[in-house]
Image (cartoon, rainbow, N blue to C red):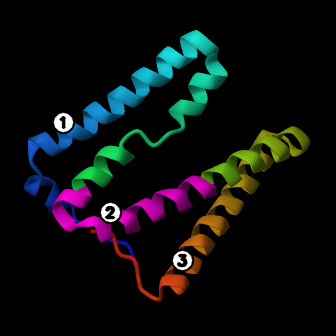
Amino acid sequence: MPKADPGKIKSERFSDYAIRFLFGAGIALVAAVVGMKLGPKAGGVLLGFPAILPASLTLIQKKEGKNEASIDSIGAVLGATALIVFAVVVAVAATGWGVLPGLLTALIVWLLVAVGLYFAVALIFEREFTAP
């Protein structure tokens, strides 16, 4: 099962956090410029990009190797897929059933999709994924 180790925060270097911050800020800046030039819909789509992902994958690859970075990238794709399903369910259900029932339905569907994808990939690779 995934786990967190808050003590690892102290072991990270400031430069690692700075790289993540700069990647996130750069992606947000690009989204803002695109939004100003092409409209808020285009900028909003880019804001959905996980801004910290490129920096995190770079740091993981540098510290733990390419295999660990590839596992994390699979997790990012699975998470993004579940969020897309959530957005589609909200868009469809909220207009037909109302906001609160639509959000609750989307939350349940998101949870089922996210957990289902996690276990499907774990079965495919026949290993247990754990957070570093």
Dot 3 falls on a residue whose secondary structure is: helix
State the separation of the CA atoms marked 3 and 1: 32 Å
State left or right for residue 98 relative to residue 20.
Answer: right
Q: Taking 78 as reference, is 67 above or below it?
A: below
Q: Mark 2 and 1 residues: CB-CB less than 8 Å, in contact?
A: no
Q: Mark 2 and 3 residues: CB-CB less than 8 Å, in contact?
A: no
Q: Name the residue under label 2.
A: 69
Task: Point out the image quarter for the N terminus.
Answer: bottom left
Give residue 42's position: percent from left, percent from top.
62, 24
- Which residue shows up at 35% across the image and 75% down it? 130
Q: Mark 1 points at which residue?
A: 18
- Which residue shows up at 19% across the image and 57% down it? 62
Looking at marks 3 and 1 on the same chain, the residue that comes earlier in the sequence is marked by 1
Q: Which amino acid does label 1 sit on?
A: Ala
State the separation of the CA atoms marked 2 and 1: 19 Å
Looking at marks 2 and 1 on the same chain, the residue that comes earlier in the sequence is marked by 1
Q: Mark 3 points at which residue?
A: 121
Give residue 57's position: percent from left, percent from top.
32, 54
The answer to whether residue 81 is seen in the rendering is: yes
Residue numbers of the magenta segment: 60-82
Q: Which of the two discs, 2 and 1, sits closer to the camera? A: 2
Task: Point out the image quarter for the C terminus.
Answer: bottom left
Give residue 35's position: percent from left, percent from top.
56, 17
Check the image and name the residue furthest to the top: 37
Q: Taking 107 as reference, is 92 above or below it?
A: above
Q: How would you classify the magenta stretch by its main secondary structure? A: helix
- Which residue shows up at 18% across the image and 36% down it? 18
- Which residue shows up at 69% across the image and 62% down it? 108
